[in-house]
């Protein structure tokens, strides 16, 4: 495979940045259904991170 | 907590327990190999588990019964800080996606069963192999013991007293693991995970409504923390580094354990693992919702003797008897899957990297499987004795140190996938610095996982395991530079 497609792997760094820098999200507002931002922001990262991994998986899907 | 025996709940509980017991023994015939008497079959299920089986197995094995009890308990006790399990179980998957398929390839091509096999294959060092194997076994033992704590909590919630039910459950587990190997937890995981999902979804759907919605739940929790004078629904700025470093350190350590690696090695292909890195976060979502039960416990004004009773007490308060029995069975069965895989992982290490390396290098394939089966029994009995005769706190402290210890095997196991620059003496030196230095830090801090560091006047607290890991990597690089310059001098 051409190495250029492996650029997608850089996407996998995003969850680390988004979750390990706590000042990004240690807030109460905006709350969602009464759930403070701190919680729903991190919960929202679950599907986002899975989606990014799925995009990265596209690089390998030909393999098996 | 109720102390009388709830017969409806108990009947439902026993039904599901009997069901998985039968499944555990029948598993020996599932995808039947020519013989179970080879380590690849008994200990790795024949390396043929596809995407779904792996999803259930690793999910059932990584999100343990103890997690189901302990994460909400920590959130109940301290608030936002206890939520670090969520970022931890999110960022673990990009790591798994990038690293574990490579490791799987190496293991598959060379027929390796354990992490220490891989390390020995690369560096040819018996010392490094033994360090990795011993760390794996020692870190896993208290983890198995904690599964018993999870199971005991569920049994206690049914109103049963005494240790006999726990011993009986564990003996049954030991017997079917002995006869079926990894196939038993893989098959039981389907039932266990389905039950846990149902219980958690029901809890998250029903409980907030009874308590006046999430807004009210968080308000009540905040009030409780204020009254208590510690904890809160947001992090204090002094907790930022602790929160992030616990998440990162735990994520790096998670797939160094023998039980998680067993799940990886048992996969059919590298892409099975990649697909699972995409799909396993479904369990993380469940864990995050489960963690919120801690706040619901606050809002429900539960009176519990120990924070570990929060989840069972909530289930008892909110659910009808039969469903409470179902939920407790889910927790107890939830303990069986990881306990089985952990004992298999530890037994594989003992067989390959101790028995075969030192006692009987000429051991046959059938001999390996026989040794591993006995070792799995010994490991489980050991964990049971620890829980029966030593204070629970002992297992808790050891499990905490176990995470710190297992993280120190990462350089030896993972660095070789990316570079052949490192040498065995350097990796061994780094391992020793990280393991003993980290243990000392944790010991000096009163067996707390956090250590205060001061850099240029600012003090912050971080996870001792990650600090030890940094020391480990630094020592490895320095010693390796020394070794490299010495060999260069010798060759010129």
Image: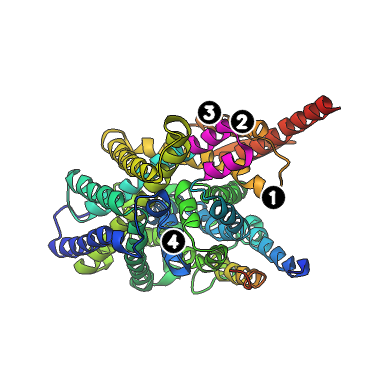
Q: CA distance from mark 2 to mark 1?
A: 22 Å
Q: Along the horizontal axis of the image, is B387 left or right of B5?
A: right
Q: Earlier in the sequence, mark 3 or mark 1?
A: 1
- Front tag of 3 and 1: 1
Identify the secondary structure beneath mark 4.
Answer: helix
Q: Which residue is mark 4?
A: B59
Q: How far across and down, in percent of the image, does residue B445 sit?
A: 52, 32
Tell me which colouring the rendered structure shows.
rainbow
- Front tag of 2 and 1: 1
Q: How far across and down, in percent of the image, does residue B403 sit?
A: 50, 42
Q: Earlier in the sequence, mark 2 or mark 1?
A: 1
Q: Earlier in the sequence, mark 2 or mark 4?
A: 4
Q: CA distance from mark 1 to mark 4?
A: 27 Å
Identify the secondary structure beneath mark 2.
Answer: helix
Place residue B354 in its image quadrant.
top left
- Front tag of 2 and 3: 2
Q: CA distance from mark 2 to mark 4?
A: 33 Å
Q: In the image, which disc is placed on residue B433?
A: 2
Q: Nearer the viewer, residue B84 or B38?
A: B38
Write the residue at 15% across / 63% down: B11
Q: Which residue is mark 1?
A: B418
Write the residue at 39% across / 40% down: B141
Q: Nearer the viewer, residue B350 or B67?
A: B350
- The boundaries of the magenta stretch are B115-135
Q: Which residue is mark 3?
A: B444
Q: How far across and down, in percent of the image, does residue B461 sit?
A: 60, 41
Identify the secondary structure beneath mark 1.
Answer: helix
């Amino acid at each position: 495979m051409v190495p250029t497609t492996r650029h997608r792997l850089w996407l996998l760094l995003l969850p680390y940045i988004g979750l390990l820098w706590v000042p990004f999200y240690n807030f109460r507002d905006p709350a969602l259904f009464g759930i403070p931002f701190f919680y729903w922001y991190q919960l929202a990262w679950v599907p986002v991170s899975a989606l990014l991994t799925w995009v990265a998986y596209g690089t390998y899907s030909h393999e098996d | 907590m109720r102390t009388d025996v709830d017969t409806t709940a108990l009947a439902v509980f026993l039904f599901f327990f009997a069901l998985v017991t039968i499944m555990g023994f029948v598993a020996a015939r599932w995808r039947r190999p020519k013989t179970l008497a080879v380590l690849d079959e008994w200990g790795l299920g024949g390396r043929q588990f596809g995407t779904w089986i792996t999803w259930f197995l690793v999910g059932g094995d990584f999100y343990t019964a103890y997690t189901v009890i302990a994460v909400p308990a920590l959130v109940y006790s301290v608030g936002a800080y206890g939520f670090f399990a969520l970022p931890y179980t999110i960022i673990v998957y990009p790591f798994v996606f990038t690293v574990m398929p490579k490791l799987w390839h190496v293991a598959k091509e060379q027929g390796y069963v354990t992490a220490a096999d891989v390390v020995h294959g690369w560096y040819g060092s018996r010392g490094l192999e033994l360090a990795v194997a011993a760390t794996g076994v020692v870190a896993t033992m208290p983890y198995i013991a904690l599964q018993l704590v999870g199971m005991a909590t569920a049994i206690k919630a049914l109103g049963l007293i005494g240790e006999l039910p726990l011993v009986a459950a564990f003996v049954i587990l030991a017997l079917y693991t002995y006869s079926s190997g990894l196939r038993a937890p893989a098959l039981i995981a389907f039932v266990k995970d389905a039950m846990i999902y149902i219980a958690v979804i029901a809890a998250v759907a029903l409980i907030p409504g009874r308590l006046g919605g999430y807004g009210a739940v968080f308000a009540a929790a905040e009030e409780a923390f204020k009254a208590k004078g510690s904890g809160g629904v947001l992090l204090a700025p002094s907790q930022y580094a602790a929160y992030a470093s616990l998440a990162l350190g735990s994520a790096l350590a998670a797939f160094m354990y023998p039980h998680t690696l067993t799940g990886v090695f048992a996969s059919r292909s590298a892409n099975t693992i990649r697909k699972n890195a995409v799909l396993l976060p479904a369990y993380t979502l469940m864990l995050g919702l489960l963690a919120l039960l801690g706040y619901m416990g606050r809002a429900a004004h539960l009176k519990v003797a120990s924070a570990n009773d929060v989840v069972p007490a909530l289930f008892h308060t909110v659910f009808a008897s039969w469903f409470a029995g179902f939920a407790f069975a889910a927790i107890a069965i939830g303990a069986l899957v990881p306990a089985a895989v952990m004992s298999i992982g530890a037994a594989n290490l003992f067989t390959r990297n101790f028995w075969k390396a030192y006692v009987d290098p000429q051991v046959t394939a059938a001999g390996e499987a026989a040794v591993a089966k006995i070792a799995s029994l010994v490991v489980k009995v050991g964990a049971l004795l620890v829980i029966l005769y030593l204070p629970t706190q002992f297992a808790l402290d050891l499990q905490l140190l176990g995470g710190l210890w297992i993280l120190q095997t990462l350089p030896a196991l993972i660095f070789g996938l990316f570079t052949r620059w490192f040498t065995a003496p350097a990796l061994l030196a780094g391992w020793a610095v990280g393991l003993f230095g980290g243990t000392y830090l944790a010991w000096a801090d009163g067996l707390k996982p956090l250590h205060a560091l001061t850099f240029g006047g600012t003090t912050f607290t971080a996870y001792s395991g990650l600090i030890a890991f940094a020391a480990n990597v630094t020592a490895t690089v320095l010693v390796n530079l020394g070794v490299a310059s010495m060999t260069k001098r010798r060759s010129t």
